[in-house]
Image (spheres, rainbow, N blue to C red):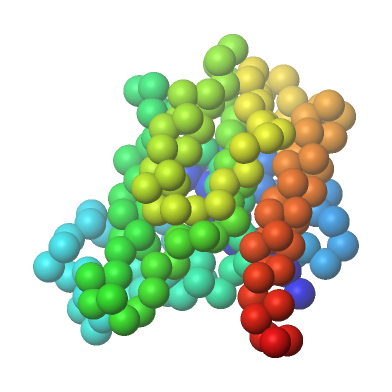
Amino acid sequence: MFKILGISRSLRADSYNTALLRAAQKVAPTGLPVEIYTRLRDIPPYDLDLDYPGRRPPVVQELRERITAATGLLIATPEYNYSIPGVLKNALDWVSTDWTRAEGLPLLRKPVAIIGAAPTTFGSVRAQLALRQVFLWTDSDVVVKPELIVFRAHERFDESGDLVDESTVDRLRNVLDALVLKIRADRQPHLAAASA
């Protein structure tokens, strides 16, 4: 069964991006559970001296293992200063390495979909572009289209944090469908090799 790990960059309790992941849980296709990662604030600043097996902080090791176990990632990001929020970039730095060349790279060829919400009229366009550059380096398999850039987010969620804008709901479904296609395409070579 597929398993998607959802990561919201925003640490805010009433985050539109976390609400967007909760909406993804509700509209995801059957057989596509979306688990939301909640420990981003606990991850310490990246430290190369500690980025080795047995030295990493437990929260970092857990995130690496959860990404490795997931069949795909769904990342919801706001935009800070025209780019990716620092805590998200920091987390990705921790999970993008394998200095021993023995563990494997959690993000290598991992299917990833990027979405984002912001109260501005430009949404998270630049943050999503910057995040795509990061995943270019990690050689992750990013959904290119469709895109989901939720601008004026405060008009698309109700007071309870539920996504109520139907056009946004439809686009979210389309992104999840595209992520499923990426996952299936990624699995085909592995399935063929296993049956050979």
Image quadrant in which the N terminus is located: bottom right
Q: Considering only vertical position in the picture, is 11 above or below 2?
A: above
Q: Which residue sits at x=83%, y=26%?
A: 167
Identify which residue is drawn at 79% across, 48% down: 177
Q: Quadrant of residue 60?
A: bottom left
Asked if one can make out residue 163 in the rendered structure from this viewpoint, the answer is no
What residue occupies the far top of the structure in this picture? 121
Rendering quarter of residue 192: bottom right
Residue closest to the eye, 29 or 109: 109
Query: Residue 49's image quarter?
Result: bottom left
Q: How many marks do you count on the picture?
A: 0
Left or right: 162, with 104 as reference point: right
Could you say where residue 174 lies in the image, as x and y percent from the top left?
Answer: 79, 40
Q: Residue at x 65, y 63 (%)?
A: 186
Question: Is residue 125 among what the camera can see?
Answer: yes
For the point 63% across and 27% down, the residue is 149
Q: Residue furthest left?
A: 49
Residue 161 percent location from the top left of the image: 71, 38
Look at the image and tell me in which quarter the C terminus lies.
bottom right
68 horizontally vs 54: left or right: right
Where residue 194 sits: x, y (%)? 67, 85
